[in-house]
Image (spheres, rainbow, N blue to C red):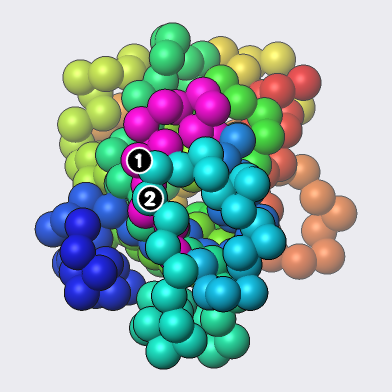
Protein backbone atom coordinates (compact mmCIF):
# COMPACT_ATOMS: atom_id res chain seq x y z
CA UNK A 1 0.00 0.00 0.00
CA UNK A 2 1.04 3.59 -0.58
CA UNK A 3 1.80 5.71 2.48
CA UNK A 4 -0.92 8.25 1.71
CA UNK A 5 -3.50 5.42 1.73
CA UNK A 6 -2.11 3.87 4.90
CA UNK A 7 -2.67 7.17 6.72
CA UNK A 8 -6.40 6.83 5.99
CA UNK A 9 -6.75 3.54 7.88
CA UNK A 10 -7.91 5.29 11.05
CA UNK A 11 -11.34 5.37 9.38
CA UNK A 12 -13.47 2.24 9.07
CA UNK A 13 -14.50 2.89 5.47
CA UNK A 14 -10.88 2.90 4.36
CA UNK A 15 -10.03 -0.18 6.42
CA UNK A 16 -12.82 -1.95 4.58
CA UNK A 17 -11.80 -0.50 1.22
CA UNK A 18 -8.14 -1.48 1.50
CA UNK A 19 -8.54 -4.56 3.70
CA UNK A 20 -5.88 -3.45 6.18
CA UNK A 21 -5.71 -1.90 9.64
CA UNK A 22 -3.09 -0.22 11.81
CA UNK A 23 -1.29 -1.70 14.78
CA UNK A 24 0.66 0.62 17.07
CA UNK A 25 3.15 0.16 19.88
CA UNK A 26 6.04 -2.14 20.74
CA UNK A 27 3.94 -4.70 22.60
CA UNK A 28 1.48 -5.16 19.75
CA UNK A 29 4.27 -5.35 17.17
CA UNK A 30 5.97 -8.09 19.20
CA UNK A 31 2.64 -9.94 19.25
CA UNK A 32 2.55 -9.51 15.48
CA UNK A 33 6.03 -11.05 15.20
CA UNK A 34 4.90 -14.08 17.23
CA UNK A 35 1.73 -14.46 15.19
CA UNK A 36 3.64 -14.20 11.90
CA UNK A 37 5.64 -17.29 12.81
CA UNK A 38 2.37 -19.24 12.67
CA UNK A 39 0.77 -17.19 9.88
CA UNK A 40 3.45 -16.55 7.23
CA UNK A 41 1.32 -14.05 5.29
CA UNK A 42 1.82 -11.59 8.16
CA UNK A 43 5.49 -11.27 7.19
CA UNK A 44 4.28 -9.03 4.37
CA UNK A 45 3.08 -6.37 6.81
CA UNK A 46 4.49 -2.90 6.25
CA UNK A 47 6.18 -1.54 9.39
CA UNK A 48 6.97 2.13 10.02
CA UNK A 49 9.35 3.25 12.76
CA UNK A 50 10.74 6.51 14.05
CA UNK A 51 14.50 6.92 14.21
CA UNK A 52 14.40 6.01 17.91
CA UNK A 53 13.35 2.49 16.98
CA UNK A 54 16.39 1.61 14.89
CA UNK A 55 17.65 -0.35 17.90
CA UNK A 56 14.62 -2.59 17.38
CA UNK A 57 15.96 -3.61 13.96
CA UNK A 58 16.74 -7.24 14.87
CA UNK A 59 13.11 -8.11 15.62
CA UNK A 60 11.81 -6.04 12.72
CA UNK A 61 14.08 -7.81 10.24
CA UNK A 62 11.42 -10.52 10.27
CA UNK A 63 9.23 -8.29 8.06
CA UNK A 64 9.77 -7.66 4.37
CA UNK A 65 9.08 -3.91 4.58
CA UNK A 66 10.41 -1.65 7.36
CA UNK A 67 10.54 2.11 6.76
CA UNK A 68 12.02 4.82 8.99
CA UNK A 69 9.79 7.91 8.96
CA UNK A 70 10.06 11.40 10.42
CA UNK A 71 8.09 12.66 13.42
CA UNK A 72 5.42 14.34 11.30
CA UNK A 73 4.63 11.17 9.35
CA UNK A 74 4.63 9.06 12.50
CA UNK A 75 2.11 11.46 14.07
CA UNK A 76 -0.14 11.02 11.03
CA UNK A 77 0.07 7.23 11.29
CA UNK A 78 -0.48 7.18 15.04
CA UNK A 79 -3.89 7.04 16.71
CA UNK A 80 -2.59 8.29 20.06
CA UNK A 81 -1.77 11.78 21.34
CA UNK A 82 1.79 10.66 22.03
CA UNK A 83 2.97 8.45 19.15
CA UNK A 84 4.76 5.31 20.28
CA UNK A 85 7.19 5.37 17.38
CA UNK A 86 6.23 2.11 15.71
CA UNK A 87 3.20 1.28 13.53
CA UNK A 88 2.37 -1.67 11.28
CA UNK A 89 -0.09 -1.93 8.40
CA UNK A 90 -1.69 -5.37 8.78
CA UNK A 91 -3.99 -7.30 6.40
CA UNK A 92 -7.51 -7.45 7.79
CA UNK A 93 -8.38 -10.88 6.39
CA UNK A 94 -10.57 -12.80 8.82
CA UNK A 95 -8.61 -15.62 10.42
CA UNK A 96 -10.10 -18.97 9.53
CA UNK A 97 -10.18 -21.72 12.12
CA UNK A 98 -7.57 -24.37 11.32
CA UNK A 99 -9.87 -27.02 12.75
CA UNK A 100 -13.53 -27.25 13.80
CA UNK A 101 -14.17 -25.28 16.98
CA UNK A 102 -16.11 -26.48 19.98
CA UNK A 103 -18.24 -23.37 20.25
CA UNK A 104 -18.91 -19.83 19.06
CA UNK A 105 -19.73 -16.61 20.87
CA UNK A 106 -22.18 -14.39 18.98
CA UNK A 107 -22.29 -10.70 19.91
CA UNK A 108 -25.35 -8.76 18.80
CA UNK A 109 -24.65 -5.08 18.07
CA UNK A 110 -21.86 -4.71 20.63
CA UNK A 111 -20.88 -1.04 20.73
CA UNK A 112 -18.07 -0.53 23.22
CA UNK A 113 -14.53 -0.98 21.83
CA UNK A 114 -13.12 -1.80 25.26
CA UNK A 115 -15.68 -4.54 25.81
CA UNK A 116 -15.00 -6.13 22.44
CA UNK A 117 -11.23 -5.97 22.85
CA UNK A 118 -11.43 -7.57 26.29
CA UNK A 119 -13.68 -10.35 24.96
CA UNK A 120 -11.31 -11.08 22.07
CA UNK A 121 -8.41 -11.29 24.51
CA UNK A 122 -10.33 -13.73 26.71
CA UNK A 123 -11.26 -15.95 23.75
CA UNK A 124 -7.61 -16.05 22.69
CA UNK A 125 -6.56 -17.04 26.21
CA UNK A 126 -8.89 -20.01 26.47
CA UNK A 127 -8.96 -20.95 22.78
CA UNK A 128 -11.29 -23.28 20.86
CA UNK A 129 -13.97 -20.58 20.56
CA UNK A 130 -14.79 -18.47 17.52
CA UNK A 131 -16.29 -14.99 17.55
CA UNK A 132 -19.21 -13.89 15.38
CA UNK A 133 -20.29 -10.25 15.21
CA UNK A 134 -23.66 -8.99 14.02
CA UNK A 135 -24.12 -6.04 11.66
CA UNK A 136 -23.95 -2.67 13.46
CA UNK A 137 -21.28 -3.93 15.85
CA UNK A 138 -18.09 -2.00 16.56
CA UNK A 139 -15.32 -2.82 14.10
CA UNK A 140 -12.94 -5.42 15.64
CA UNK A 141 -10.09 -3.65 13.81
CA UNK A 142 -10.92 -0.27 15.35
CA UNK A 143 -7.68 1.00 16.99
CA UNK A 144 -9.31 1.07 20.43
CA UNK A 145 -10.47 -2.54 20.06
CA UNK A 146 -7.05 -3.65 18.86
CA UNK A 147 -5.35 -1.98 21.84
CA UNK A 148 -7.81 -3.47 24.32
CA UNK A 149 -7.29 -6.94 22.83
CA UNK A 150 -3.50 -6.62 23.32
CA UNK A 151 -2.87 -8.27 19.98
CA UNK A 152 -5.30 -11.15 20.48
CA UNK A 153 -7.01 -10.40 17.14
CA UNK A 154 -4.33 -12.56 15.50
CA UNK A 155 -5.39 -15.62 17.46
CA UNK A 156 -9.20 -15.63 17.33
CA UNK A 157 -11.32 -16.54 14.27
CA UNK A 158 -13.57 -13.50 13.79
CA UNK A 159 -16.57 -13.26 11.48
CA UNK A 160 -18.17 -9.86 10.87
CA UNK A 161 -21.62 -8.68 9.75
CA UNK A 162 -23.35 -12.02 10.33
CA UNK A 163 -27.09 -11.49 10.73
CA UNK A 164 -28.74 -13.13 13.72
CA UNK A 165 -31.33 -14.69 11.42
CA UNK A 166 -28.67 -16.70 9.56
CA UNK A 167 -27.41 -18.64 12.56
CA UNK A 168 -30.09 -21.33 12.28
CA UNK A 169 -28.39 -22.68 9.16
CA UNK A 170 -25.19 -23.32 11.13
CA UNK A 171 -26.18 -24.20 14.68
CA UNK A 172 -28.93 -26.17 16.39
CA UNK A 173 -28.30 -25.50 20.09
CA UNK A 174 -28.26 -21.96 21.47
CA UNK A 175 -27.79 -20.55 24.96
CA UNK A 176 -28.08 -17.02 26.35
CA UNK A 177 -27.96 -15.23 29.69
CA UNK A 178 -31.08 -14.35 31.65
CA UNK A 179 -31.75 -13.57 35.31
CA UNK A 180 -34.16 -16.51 35.51
CA UNK A 181 -31.99 -19.11 33.80
CA UNK A 182 -30.25 -22.22 35.03
CA UNK A 183 -26.79 -21.71 36.54
CA UNK A 184 -23.82 -21.50 34.17
CA UNK A 185 -22.13 -23.83 36.65
CA UNK A 186 -24.37 -26.68 35.56
CA UNK A 187 -22.95 -29.41 33.32
CA UNK A 188 -25.64 -28.60 30.79
CA UNK A 189 -24.12 -25.19 30.01
CA UNK A 190 -21.20 -26.70 28.07
CA UNK A 191 -23.43 -28.62 25.64
CA UNK A 192 -24.27 -25.75 23.30
CA UNK A 193 -22.77 -24.72 19.97
CA UNK A 194 -23.54 -21.00 19.99
CA UNK A 195 -23.73 -18.61 22.94
CA UNK A 196 -25.72 -15.44 22.29
CA UNK A 197 -24.87 -12.14 23.98
CA UNK A 198 -26.70 -8.91 23.32
CA UNK A 199 -26.05 -5.22 23.01
CA UNK A 200 -24.80 -3.57 26.22
CA UNK A 201 -28.14 -1.78 26.66
CA UNK A 202 -30.77 -3.91 24.92
CA UNK A 203 -29.64 -7.53 25.04
CA UNK A 204 -30.51 -10.17 22.44
CA UNK A 205 -33.84 -9.59 20.60
CA UNK A 206 -36.53 -11.73 22.22
CA UNK A 207 -38.00 -12.83 18.90
CA UNK A 208 -34.70 -14.44 17.94
CA UNK A 209 -34.47 -16.23 21.28
CA UNK A 210 -37.96 -17.64 20.74
CA UNK A 211 -37.29 -18.64 17.14
CA UNK A 212 -34.13 -20.52 18.09
CA UNK A 213 -35.63 -21.97 21.28
CA UNK A 214 -32.50 -20.75 23.02
CA UNK A 215 -32.03 -21.93 26.59
CA UNK A 216 -31.52 -19.34 29.37
CA UNK A 217 -28.68 -19.47 31.88
CA UNK A 218 -27.65 -17.13 34.65
CA UNK A 219 -24.45 -16.09 36.41
CA UNK A 220 -25.29 -16.36 40.07
CA UNK A 221 -24.25 -13.45 42.25
CA UNK A 222 -24.75 -12.10 45.74
CA UNK A 223 -27.59 -9.83 44.64
CA UNK A 224 -25.81 -6.58 45.47
CA UNK A 225 -26.09 -5.23 41.90
CA UNK A 226 -28.53 -5.75 39.04
CA UNK A 227 -26.19 -6.78 36.25
CA UNK A 228 -22.67 -7.32 34.93
CA UNK A 229 -21.14 -5.48 32.03
CA UNK A 230 -20.95 -7.37 28.74
CA UNK A 231 -17.24 -8.19 28.81
CA UNK A 232 -17.44 -9.46 32.40
CA UNK A 233 -20.42 -11.68 31.58
CA UNK A 234 -18.82 -13.18 28.47
CA UNK A 235 -15.51 -13.71 30.26
CA UNK A 236 -17.15 -15.56 33.14
CA UNK A 237 -19.07 -17.78 30.74
CA UNK A 238 -16.02 -18.63 28.65
CA UNK A 239 -14.04 -19.42 31.79
CA UNK A 240 -16.82 -21.73 32.93
CA UNK A 241 -16.89 -23.45 29.53
CA UNK A 242 -13.13 -24.02 29.60
CA UNK A 243 -13.18 -25.76 32.98
| Residue bounds of the magenta highlight | 35-48
Q: Tell me residue 110's x, y (percent).
A: 41, 58
Q: Residue at x 21, y 57 (%)?
A: 1
Q: Residue 148 in magenta? A: no
Q: Is residue 178 visible?
A: no
State the residue position of label 1. 44
Q: Residue at x 55, y 81 (%)?
A: 83
Picture disc at residue 65: 2
Image quarter for residue 126? Answer: top right
Residue 69 horizontal side relative to residue 38, left or right: left
Image quarter for residue 22? Answer: bottom left
Residue 142 horizontal side relative to residue 155, left or right: left
Q: Earlier in the sequence, mark 1 or mark 2?
A: 1
* Camera-nearest residue between 105 and 123: 123
Dividing the image into 4 quarters, which one contains the C terminus?
top right
**In the displayed image of the protein, which residue is found farthest to the left?**
17
* Camera-nearest residue between 12 and 39: 39
| Residue neighbourhood size for the residue with mark 1, other residues' Cα within 10 Å, grouped as few (<14), some (14–19), many (≥20) | some
Q: Is residue 160 above or below residue 136?
A: above
Q: Is residue 196 above or below residue 99?
A: below
Amino acid sequence: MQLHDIKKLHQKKYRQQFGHYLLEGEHLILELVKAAKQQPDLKDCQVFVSEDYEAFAKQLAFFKSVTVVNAKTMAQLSDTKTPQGIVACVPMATKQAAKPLRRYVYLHEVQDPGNLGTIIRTLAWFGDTGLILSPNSVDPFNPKVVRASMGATFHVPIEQDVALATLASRFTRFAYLDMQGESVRSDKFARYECYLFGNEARGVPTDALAAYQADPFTIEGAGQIDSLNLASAVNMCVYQLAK
